[in-house]
Amino acid sequence: MNIKNLVAATYTPMHKDTSLNLDIIKTYGDFLKRNKVSGAFINGTTGDFASLTIQERKLIVEAWSANRADDFLLINHVGHTSLKVAMDLTSHSADKVDAIGALAPFYFKVNSVDKLVEYCKNIASCAPGLPFYYYHIPDLSGAQIKMIDFVKIASKQIPNFAGLKFTKNDLIDYKYCFDYDSNKYNILFGVDEMFIASLPLGTKGWVGSTYNHLAPLYYKVKEAFENDDYQMAADLQTKAMLFVDTLNNKGGYNGVAKGFMKTLGIDCGPSRFPHTTLKDGDYVEITKELDAIGLTPYFGK
């Protein structure tokens, strides 16, 4: 598998009481596809997987699988502090998705590349017919391991190893992984605020939360870059950065950005503790601030 273009790290839709709202997933998927998003990375950081029960994570996979278009990719994140649970989640979703992703255990930390490979090998073996992606997000997982060291070993020991979701502002390590074995592996870039920096490196696939809201903007950045209009590309990237900063300053990006989806017509509901859930009136002011930045024309519709 070679995942290309934008993949949205999706939110977990909820009712007002924070129970799952699975009925909106088809509408959510249609919205993403309409904005040229090529797939969804579900049950990940953006989806607050650590605040979900195991059963809820399974229900989310089932709902997305039942309601997605045939040409819309589905990647399920199965990482967990328990390897046994991660393997169970993988087995459950093996016939429902196009690929599996997993971050490292995040309480008792993985402290060596060999342990990380062992963890991933066990998970990947539960869905041998699916591509496996390691989700590198060391600021949250605590697995501070150079990915080029991991890729060199994982590529030999995990038959279905496909690549990485690389969510770390380390372009040197990213480039080493991207180039490894003549660009054999699918190294997906996962730092939205640095999207423009990934373009000269040859990146073809991206996974991130802001692609829920601003997919048209990122395609404009890419288009401007390819047309050698670097100033326009940089100016648009700055707008994407200001989007994140603006929402983050209102109480924390994850929860506030999830609530902002309602202004785009997709009501994902509240966030679970400890994320912030704002009131509708707060988003009126936020929308005004974002419009002043010049972001309104680039929101998904």
Image: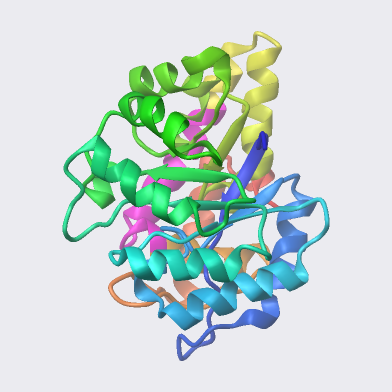
Q: Position of residue 178 (x, y in %)?
A: 49, 21
* Closer to us: 226 or 59: 59
- Seen at 66% across and 59% down, the residue is 97
Is residue 243 a member of the stretch shown in magenta? yes
* Closer to us: 153 or 148: 153
- Seen at 43% across and 36% down, the residue is 157
Q: Residue furthest bottom?
A: 17
- Seen at 41% across and 24% down, the residue is 174
- Seen at 54% across and 67% down, the residue is 91
Is residue 98 a member of the stretch shown in magenta? no
Q: Position of residue 110 (x, y in %)?
A: 21, 48
* Closer to us: 112 or 74: 112
* Closer to us: 43 or 291: 43
* Quadrant of the image containing the C terminus: bottom right
Magenta part of the chain: 236-254
Q: Position of residue 265 (x, y in %)?
A: 68, 68
Position of residue 184 in the picture relative to residue 67 (left or right): left
Q: Position of residue 63 (x, y in %)?
A: 67, 75
| 61 relative to 249, above or below | below
Predominant SS of the magenta segment: helix
Say if residue 76 shows up in the picture.
yes
